[in-house]
Amino acid sequence: MIIEKLAWRNIWRNRRRTFITLSSIFFAVILSSLMMSIKEGMYSLMIQSAVGSYSGYLQINTSDFTSDGTLDNGFVFTQAMSDDLNGIKSQIKAIPRIENFALSAYGDKTRGTLVLGTDIIAEKELTQIDERIISGSCLSRNDKGVLLGKGLAEYLNIAVADTIVLLGQGYHGTSAAGKFAVKGIVSLGSPELSKQLVVMDLGNAQQLYSAPGVITQLNIWPSEDAGLQTSKTLLAGIVGNEMDIRTWKEVMPEIDKMIQADRVEGYVFMFILYLVISFGIFGTLLMMLVERAYEFGMLLSIGMKRMSLAFMVWLEALFLSLAGAMIGIAGAIPVCYYFNQNPIRFGDEFNEMFEEYGFEPIMKASMDLGIFFEQALIIAALSSILALYPVLKIFTMNILSSRQS
Amino acid sequence: MKKIVVQTIGLSKTFKGPLPVHAVQSVDLTIEDDEFTAIVGPSGSGKTTLLNMIGGLDRPTSGSVSVNGLDLNKLSDHELTNFRLKHIGFVFQSFNLIPVLTARENAEFILLLQKYPRIEREQRVLQLLNEVGLQDKVDSRPSQLSGGQQQRVAVVRALASKPDFVIADEPTANLDSKSASNLLDIMERLNREEGITFIFSTHDQRVIDRARRVITLVDGKIASDERR
Ligand SMILES: Nc1ncnc2c1ncn2[C@@H]1O[C@H](COP(=O)(O)OP(=O)(O)O)[C@@H](O)[C@H]1O
Ligand SMILES: [Mg+2]
């Protein structure tokens, strides 16, 4: 206890210097936490809009579909599967879907689209598609109309009640063509999806593509407490082992990769920030060492172990930097909390910039406590490394000559 | 026959350099239990070097020091540190105390390092601080104490754990004569009442007059050794 007490009091021997060191750590920690919190916040929004409100956390499809994602590699969604899935509804929810490509046309404009044939009731429950209708109304079961992504509607210059023409390839070489009334326009989180999505009732899509009973995939939302792994096992029992059950990261590796790359960018910035303050911390430790050479000599003379003295100096470095980290975190949390509760929505002029990166133009800070904990951990590791020098000095210092000054 | 606490045989220390300095030369010395001994001599005569070797702070070039029959040459650096902690008390000329600890905490420091139980520690230290007249200063930091008061705390720290002997290298050198004589009074009384062996160096005649044995060093050799 005496060592800890000494270390803590020693930090405050030169208040001005300690204050300067603390502020540098404070700024580094607050900047890093804010940056990481905003980055993580954007990632979770992105995952939320791509995964939570579109693809689900797991996807089941045939193994052929995994390598070649066409309708021909779809499978028959049997009544037995449907019943079994219904049985585990409290833990795992599923939407049977067809995803297929088609050419859309309206007036003199055409565009490639992603046609989503889906169980509209399940869709409402899991992706809240009905809440994202910005004009017109949502589909009902067996509806013959379609919903268009906002970006697509804008491109085609088509409005609710207009009729869109879809042309494509059906099941096993048949041709697919149809005219559909636009019932509503949906706003989608992902700008990419917004530009190409056409949503219709599953039965309607099966008819368009001449694929009765066929779906390309089951998209799965496990409940909070049914983990991905247990869900996988449970689902394999229902659909059989020949089916691929993949996580969203496997289905959409590009999203995960982009997040990883962006995160690395953050870490590089953080590294530079912490490198800069390292010099300050090191300088402080060095001065503490030089100023107290006599005292260290005295302590070693009267019988204090070098190990204890080294431990004290390491604790001083740790206390100093952790104190800085604590106030930095204490400063960052309210700011992050504010931007978590009041996300900033950027004006339309930023849309394009954000879209390029696949983000929604919203800045929302994450309140994941791991972000703040990570800063404290980095600072602790950093100061421990920096303390190696004074520690080494203590192990090699000469008792008598240090007392001669 | 009294017990022999310190015995040096042919103790020498030579500092290497372009001109080697023979700081201590073939010193044969025996110090018995309960002695109150002054090592005197002009500056540079080797007092500090001799005390450092006796206290296990420095190793001799040749010869040996034994404390209660234990040859210090046989101890590793680590063992020597532990030996100093448990068997020898130190009082230096100045800056003896840790600035961030109070008088009581400084006085307790050796006992803390030796892991004495709290009750025992407090009793012993408060009693000793009382004896040296610092009962009102127990919670003061060194910066709030006079030089003489600081030295008294250092003396208490040195003998709190009842070491085999206390080494004090010019403990009064930075004190005015009144504080110096006061410190000597205290050391003398503790020597008598606690039976603590004191070996101190000085070149102050008034301090020399208080010693019961005076060993005079000249050029690192014992020039005279008188008991009175
Ligand atoms: N570390 C050292 N290196 C070289 N010479 C030293 C060292 N320490 C002491 N000396 C020399 O040894 C001699 C005795 O010094 P010291 O023991 O300090 O004497 P005193 O304490 O009596 O003043 C002096 O000549 C001094 O210069
Ligand atoms: Mg000296």
Image (spheres, coloured by chain):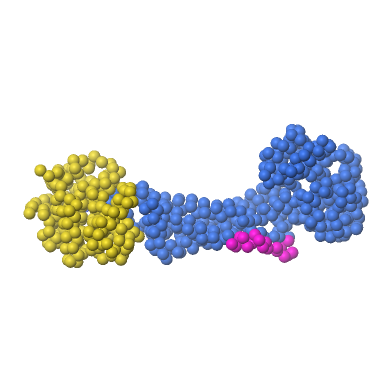
Chain colours: A blue, B yellow
Q: Classify the position of the C terminus of chain A by image quarter.
A: bottom left
Residue drawn at point x = 89 percent, y = 50 percent = A143
Residue A355 in the image: x percent, y percent?
Answer: 73, 57
User: What's the magenta region?
Assistant: A334-351
Percent x, y of residue B44: 17, 56
Image coordinates for residue B190, horizontal then vertical, percent = 19, 55
Residue at point 60% right, 51% down? Answer: A264
Query: Can residue A41 be seen from the camera position used here?
Result: yes
What secondary structure do most residues of the magenta stretch adopt? Answer: helix
The x, y position of residue A247, in whole percent, is: 70, 42
Q: Report if residue B72 lies within the magenta region.
A: no
In the picture, measured across the screen, residue A282 lies left or right of residue A206, that is left
Relative to A306, is B176 on the left or the right? left
Seen from the viewer's position, the closer of residues A16 and A319 is A319
User: Could you say which is closer to the camera, residue A297 or residue A259?
Assistant: A297
Is the residue B176 above or below the residue B104 in the image?
Answer: below
Q: Can residue B219 be seen in this view?
A: no
Query: Taking B182 as reference, is A89 left or right?
Result: right
Residue at (68%, 39%) from the top-left corner? A230
Of all residues, the one furthest to the top in this rendering is A241
Residue in view at x 20 percent, y 49 percent: B165
How many labels were placed on the picture? 0
Where is residue A97, by image quadrant?
top right
Say if B31 sits above or below A288 in the image: above
| In front of the other: A165 or B181 | B181
